[in-house]
Amino acid sequence: MIDRVFVRNNKKCLSKQQRIGIIVAFVQVLFVLFWVSRQGSLYWDTFYSFEKTHYITETVYGNHYINDDKEYSINQWLGAGYVQYTLFVDRRESVFFAELPFLVKTFLKDPYFVLLNAVQAVFSPRQVSRWPGIWLNICSLVISQFALWNVVKKITKDDNKALLAIIMYGFSGMAFSMASYVRFYSFSTMLLMLFVFFHVVLWEVRIENWFCRLLCELVALLCAYLSMRSTQLTLFFYSIFIVIYGTALLFQKQIKNFILYVLPMLCGGGTYIYKNAFYLDMLTNPSEAVDTVIGPARWVMDSYLSLSPSEFINRLAHTFLYMGKYGFGFWPVFLLFIIIFIYTMIKTNGKLFYGTMEKVIFTTFVLFMVVATCFNFYVQTRYTSYIYPILALISASTLVAFINITNKSVYSKIIVGFIVASIVYSSVSGLRVDFVFAKDKEPLQNVRESGIEDVVAIQQDIHNLDAEIIYEAAYNLSADARIMPLMYTDIDEICPSLPDAILLVNRLDFDQTKEFERNGYEIEWQEETYCYRYCYMKR
């Protein structure tokens, strides 16, 4: 059974392409580590990952934030050491000491943060460190590559396509960026690829035993569920894929397999929708639902309600640019690939994807990108990060087919080599690697060495929507410092009671420096990062 599920060669342990693939994956990991080591500061969303990981074992709150703690109060001093405490994991408070029923329930709700809590407790207890999350991302990337190789190999029976696919995805700007960023996107991508992998196994291996088939489907469904719990927008991909795959079973007249497939998928999907009733509201009454949903679902609904033919064309252009940038390095290279794709489709009489699973995956990709364009996913490029292995699969199949239909001419190989070189260069050079902020190292080092202990962090919202500025300040200060989360509307009222020397931390797009100057403060020195301005002020 195992020999049929995983790609193996009975004559020798590893083919030439597989050995090259292992080396390629190793090199990709090295470059991820290199760019992480170059990071000058942490992207603001990373602090929310740390916060969520710290509080994941909290049993009182559904979602616990620092402003739920009795120690936190707006316009009051807060110890930097305490803020740092909310960003790391104490081994005694980790998931290893949680009760099993609670742990299972929490894992099914927030799988990524449960795993991250465990990794932090083992490798960096009581330390605010990005490395546990990075290693979790790297493991996810490697597993994604393994799944991608097996998916391509099983549906195309071509090692060259499999090798090209893992090169194109693993060296893409999207793969590097998500692996360098402590958030759940690499983890969700891994689960999506495992979901696709198990479907390929179901189709290609032709498992006849109903129990084994059902077990495979349930594992795939679990992958989809955990992925949606991490990145809710993957719901669109899974919904489309399940419909297309079920339709393919009907067209192939696999009635028994269709029934065995549809029942768990409908029951599982129906239960998920029922448990998350706002999805039904979004479908049936979007104009009212937009006022009740939060997070990404809010701007998805806003985008849907503002959709028009001209707006769709505008969003399509942006989707094209971002996919070219993060999938191929440069949009003109992506345009070249599209031309090759059209040419290859014409030369093969529309039979570029001759296998059923290839057609299922390609159709799902196209329909998902239509949905992603309509709903404006490009606003945050990471919201489509999980689709890039599928893009690599389609690209690899197209480019190898292009070489074959041109009789493996030198010119076609040069063109394909140029496309691959563009992808590799854009990431290896750092041109398409986000969240590095290498220029922030020196400014933040100056802040750390200043030894300032009175810090005022400007708040734009009384709720938790901008708590990351407190985390940013605490992360770059001594545990002995103190921080005041100061509401911007209360600056004039609070200023008279502040020390004569303070370190003011603002967002660059919400600078309140002039308000303090009006209250008698003068800037002694200041440092800027990608998002924040640190101003040392005296009066």
Image (cartoon, rainbow, N blue to C red):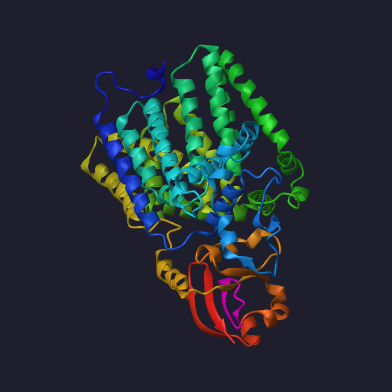
Q: Is residue 463 left or right of residue 367?
A: right
Marker count (numbered)? 0
The verdict on residue 270 being magenta is no
Q: Position of residue 108 (x, y in %)?
A: 61, 35
Which residue is painted at 33% across and 57% down in the image?
A: 429
Q: Does residue 268 appear in the picture of this structure?
A: yes
Which residue is painted at 53% across and 55% down in the image?
A: 46
Q: Nearer the viewer, residue 532 or 265?
A: 532
Q: Quadrant of residue 425?
A: bottom left
The verdict on residue 503 being magenta is yes
Q: Position of residue 199 (x, y in %)?
A: 50, 26
Q: Is residue 143 above or below residue 487?
A: above
- Quadrant of the image for the N terminus? top left
Q: Nearer the viewer, residue 66 or 505?
A: 66
Q: Position of residue 392 (x, y in %)?
A: 40, 41
Q: Is residue 526 above or below residue 412?
A: below
- Quadrant of the image for the C terminus? bottom right
Which residue is painted at 57% across and 84% down in the image?
A: 538
Q: Quadrant of residue 263?
A: top right
Q: Does residue 237 appear in the picture of this structure?
A: no
Q: Nearer the viewer, residue 402 or 147?
A: 147
Q: Position of residue 439 (x, y in %)?
A: 40, 67
Magenta highlight range: 500-514
Residue closest to the far top: 209
